[in-house]
Image: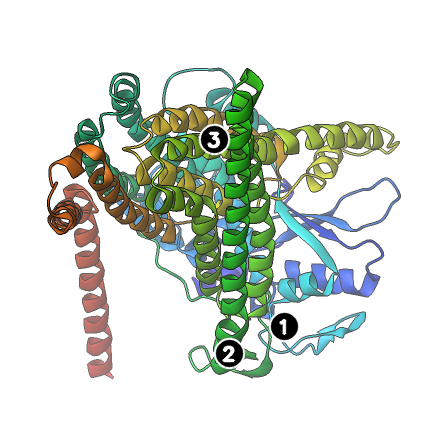
Amino acid sequence: MAESWSFLDTFESNFRPLVVIELAKGTKKETIEWFTKRIVDKKANGGAQLLVKPLATENGDENIYLVGASHLRLLLGAETVGLVKECSDNSMRAFTYSSRKTFKDFADDNQNFLTMAECQYIIKHELENLRAKDEKMIPGYPQAKLYPGKSIVRRLLTSGVLVQIFPLHDREELKKLRHSWYGRVKVGYQPLDEIRCYFGETIALYFGFLEYFTFALIPMAVIGIPYYVFAWEDYDKYVMFATFNLLWSTAILEVWKRICAIMTYHWGTLLMKRQFEEPRPGFHGVLGVNPVTGREEPVYSSIKRQLRIYLVSLPFVCLCLYFSLYVMMIYFDLEQWALDYHEENGSNFSSLMLFVPSIIYAVVIEIMNRIYRYAAEFLTSWENHRLESSYQNHLILKVLVFNFLNCFASLFYIAFVLFDMKLLRQSLATLLITSQILNQFAESLLPYWLQKRQKMRMKKRVHSLKKDTDLSLVEQVNLEKEMGTYFGTFDDYLELFLQFGYVSLFSCVYPLAAVFAVLNNVTEIYSDALKMCRVYKRPFAEPTANIGVWQLAFETMSVISVVTNCILIGMSPQVNALFPDSKMDLILTVALVEHLLLAIKFIMAFVIPDKPRDIQIKLARLEFESLEALKQQQMQLAAESLKE
């Protein structure tokens, strides 16, 4: 492939803008010239060999640039990033330019062989891998230091010279996607392949998991309705329901692994090789040499990082957990006040007042979760993790621990300290429904309304232009650069994780939880689709093979739900009546049943393969062919050395 770069020109008459670069207003001319030159320079000279074109603005400032690439450049970039495409024999293989003719639907004049999302991902990869050579600083900004191997884009971002980089929407394709996705109310599956082609695998996997989880909740909802209507106080009848719930929670997570493997194999990401992780943008330290790559990069002591984690972050998280418990006790004082008020008055108004403390507490929980999220992000960034994966793992751990305690501590206290099943049902229903309403408003309705207002103001400003230029493109760029930024699927998965906890942890007490979860998720699919297409800038595609650490989080929640449901059933009067003389026998029986159910869960997880048999065979065949090709290559090298 190295020889292919030499004949690749940086000019193409049919320029197709794919990515927008917005520089800070007033950026020095020498900085712009240096940066754009590095973008268009040939690979041999340390450039990205892409195409750049300034966008005409209202006041003539050249701070917005459009980036594209020739078809040949994108094909070579596809090989560099390790994209996997379907071959003519229906197998999936890593794309190489030398074997391009063997891939399905490939033609030299087929500009659609790579999806627009893949093209934008390639450009993002090339821009992020623009590295300093001999420069000691960014031209025009002596305070922005550089050193050999430092990512130029990351330094420009941290220095405030570069405002943002984002991929452009394809308005025609987006219009088609909106129509097939949420343009009309219908009962059916989402167009996941179209979502993947437009937004990438990470977004498509989230919507695939949301759809799958919603369908998986339907049996629980259908079974839960008659239990709620006909057998409210008869707890021994909930044993079968709780047992089904526990087995259901294991089965759906194991089946999801198989569905996920099928989708990602078809999309090619299951076969993509994991690339060596570069230091994250916020990582800092003294300049040193990476022992693996041999490149100069910041080095930071792991001992200092551990001290920051255990002496600062951990005590702060514990303090937040204590504060959450303190707020919970205030909530119980309010509950007692509402109960006393109702006993004194006994009116319809006092009956409604019984729900007020739970509603207020649900709102406070959401506020505390969001404030803590910002604090957790600041702390995790301050810990100075070198890799993005390490940063994400520490952030997710902090957020999950706090959210779990903040959302479920009151329910555990009511169930296992107060032993008030009626209050538990009321609190669970109020927390679940209120949190769903607040999330829908905060994540979709409010951003959509704000974006609509911003769009109207921007349209008026753009139409005031009096230039002979492509007004539609100017309008599109100016509209999109003011849109909100989608920061990933973290909050979306977190919402589903908490919902899964509400449904599974106390299923034998409130069977209707699954019903409300289904209703919420149906609207969530449409509101999230609207959010992705109308509210936020288009995110860069990110190849992924699974939902990552969230799979482990859901599995952990399902294990905890076994324990809670077994204890709740053991606390019921009907079960207690079976052991009138010895509470120890009751405890041992509940523990035995709990261990038995856990054993069944783990056996099911072991018996159900993570990948279907045909996928396993295809992966094994590809591995065998790779080993054979490597063996042939080594034999050829050995034969050539013998000839010499």
Q: Is residue 136 left or right of residue 556?
A: right
Quarter placement of the N terminus: bottom left
Which residue position holds label 3? 430
422, 429: nearer the viewer:
422
As rendered, which of 249 and 455 lies closer to the eye?
Answer: 249
**Between marks 2 and 3, how big is the CA–CA gap?**
41 Å
**164 with respect to 337 (left or right):** right
* SS for callout 1: loop
Q: Nearer the viewer, residue 41 or 410?
A: 410
Kind of element beneath mark 3: helix
The residue that disc 2 covers is 307
Q: How is the image coloured?
A: rainbow
* Mark 1, residue position: 132
Amino acid at circle 2: Leu
Q: Earlier in the sequence, mark 3 or mark 1?
A: 1
Q: Quote the CA–CA distance across marks 3 and 1.
A: 56 Å
Asked if disc 3 and disc 1 are in contact, CB closer than 8 Å, the reply is no
Q: Disc 2 or disc 3, which is closer to the eye?
A: 3
Q: Going 43% across and 60% down the picture, which residue do you hit?
A: 393
Relative vertical location of residue 402 with respect to residue 635 in this rendering, above or below: above
Which type of secondary structure does the marked residue at label 2 adopt? helix
- Give coordinates of residue 556: x percent, y percent: 30, 51
Mark 1 Cα within 10 Å, few/some/many (few <14, many 20+)? many
Q: Mark 2: few, some, or many residues within 10 Å (few <14, many ≥20)?
A: few
